[in-house]
Amino acid sequence: MTCPHCAASISEKEERCPYCDSYIEHMIPKVSPPVQNRQLLNQGEDKTELLLIILSFIIPMAGIILGAIQLSTGKAKSGKIYLVLGIISFFVLPCSFSVLPIMFSLLFNMKA
Ligand SMILES: [Zn+2]
């Protein structure tokens, strides 16, 4: 490596330049492994959270139960999302199921 102060070629292990007597700052990796691991963990949590949000929308009761669990474990923010989604789908799903037969009967009436 070269000394950043006097540009003399010196040994990699050298802590001080033998020519200009200045300390050498060795390259330290900017991203430390623990940080990377934490980011990976967070990504995994995001994926399961997304799945749970979808689940709570498809199955209203699951959303309400999940929301109650999240709220009781102190995760108020995501708990509220599950609860709200569960409640919304609780009302939306029966409506869409009751609307579908009406739509079909209308279509058949149009043909007839
Ligand atoms: Zn030097």
Image (cartoon, rainbow, N blue to C red):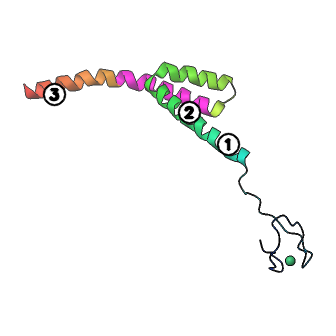
Q: Residue at x 45, y 22 (%)?
A: 59
Q: Of circles 2 and 1, which is in front? A: 1
Mark 2, other Cα within 10 Å: few <14 / some 14–19 / many ≥20: some
**Circle 1: residue type:** Asn
Residue pointed to by mark 2: 49
Q: Is residue 61 left or right of residue 96?
A: right
Residue 72 shown left or right of residue 22 in the figure: left
User: Which badge, 3 or 1, is on the more N-terminal residue?
Assistant: 1
Mark 3 or 1, closer to the camera: 1
Q: What residue type is disc 3 on?
A: Leu
**Which residue reaches farthest left?**
112
Question: What amino acid type should be assigned to the residue bearing mark 2?
Answer: Glu
Q: Is 94 included in the stretch rendered in magenta?
A: yes
- The quarter of the picture where residue 74 lies is top right
Indicate whether 94 appears above or below 45.
above
Which quadrant of the rendered structure holds the N terminus? bottom right
Instruction: Give residue 107's mark.
Output: 3
Q: Is mark 1 within 8 Å of ligand 1?
A: no
Q: Which residues are magenta?
A: 78-95
